[in-house]
Image (cartoon, grey):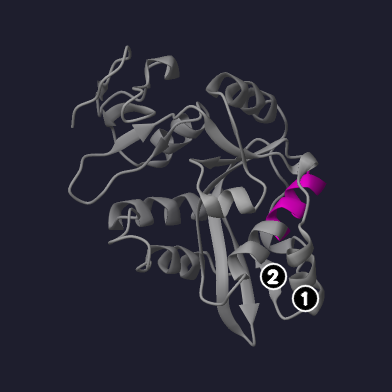
């Protein structure tokens, strides 16, 4: 892979956990910072605490990213749109936390109409299952008539949540999951949800773009706070 900008693309030493300063990330492709390392919990936790995340395909080495601008949701400024309020009022869904993490990550790996294949490789899925076992990765599940209709998963560090992927099998189910996640995290004092890279779906959910410097300031604030309460399964179930 090649890149062009003023930054540096770092080849990581698999024996030593460490990332270069994020200001060295490439501009083309936007945010590519380093190659290599592994997906052990120690590597992943070190990355997320720096605002760095892995994103690669089966035919690539592990690629680490820190894009700018960064797509985020600020729970204190989040507003639910009129259409979504109507969906919530109908009460067709039940929402839970951390009740079916494995099912959620498998559903997120499934084929999408808008893309070929999946970026959630076997290696990555196994890594996030281990992060869930250790209490760092969490899921939100949306159920309809006892069946999993949609959901999302991500990583929690301090009072920051790093969203990774979402899916839906029923219209609006992923949006319902996201709304309830934001509601719960706001109750827990979360200053920011990281959504990584903007797209129309995230924008429709209230996500905004901020420069890397602003993102990292919010990240530092959230990491200095105590972790979210555990276990997440005891968070309020809706519906």
Count of numbered marks = 2
- At horizontal 24% and vertical 25% (from top left) the residue drawn is 3
Residue 69 versus residue 183 in the image, above or below = above
Residue 182 part of the magenta segment: yes
Instruction: Name the image quarter holding residue 47.
Output: top left
Q: Nearer the viewer, residue 87 or 15?
A: 87
Q: Residues within 10 Å of mark 1 (few under 14, many from 20)?
A: some
**What residue did someone put label 1 on?**
239
Residue 137 shows up from this direction: no
What secondary structure predominates along the stretch shown in magenta? helix
- At horizontal 68% and vertical 63% (from top left) the residue drawn is 233
Q: Which residues are magenta?
A: 180-188
Instruction: Name the image quarter holding residue 151.
Output: bottom right
**What residue did someone put label 2 on?**
95
- Toward the bottom, the furthest residue is 145
Q: Where residue 65 sits in the image (x, y, percent)?
A: 39, 32
């Amino acid at each position: 892979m090649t890149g062009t900008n003023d930054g540096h693309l770092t080849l990581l030493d698999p024996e030593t956990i460490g990332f270069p300063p994020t200001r060295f990330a490439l501009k083309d492709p936007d945010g590519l910072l380093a190659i290599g390392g592994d997906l052990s919990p120690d590597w992943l936790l070190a990355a997320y605490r720096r605002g760095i995340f892995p994103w690669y395909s089966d035919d690539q080495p592990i690629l680490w990213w820190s894009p700018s601008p960064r797509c985020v949701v600020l729970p204190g400024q989040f507003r639910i749109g009129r259409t979504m309020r109507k969906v919530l009022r109908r009460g067709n869904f039940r929402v839970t936390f951390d009740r079916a993490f494995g099912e959620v990550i498998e559903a997120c790996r499934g084929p999408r109409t808008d893309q070929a294949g999946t970026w959630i490789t076997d290696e990555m899925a196994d890594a996030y299952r281990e992060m869930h076992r250790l209490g760092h990765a969490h899921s939100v599940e949306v159920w309809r008539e006892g069946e999993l209709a949609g959901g999302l998963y991500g990583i929690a560090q301090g009072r920051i949540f790093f969203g990774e992927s979402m899916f839906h099998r029923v219209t609006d189910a992923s949006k319902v999951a996201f709304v309830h996640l934001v509601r719960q995290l706001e109750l827990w004092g979360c200053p920011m949800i990281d959504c990584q890279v903007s797209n129309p779906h995230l924008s429709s959910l209230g996500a905004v773009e901020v420069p890397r410097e602003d993102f990292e300031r919010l990240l530092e604030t959230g990491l200095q706070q105590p972790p979210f309460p555990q276990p997440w399964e005891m968070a309020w179930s809706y519906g």
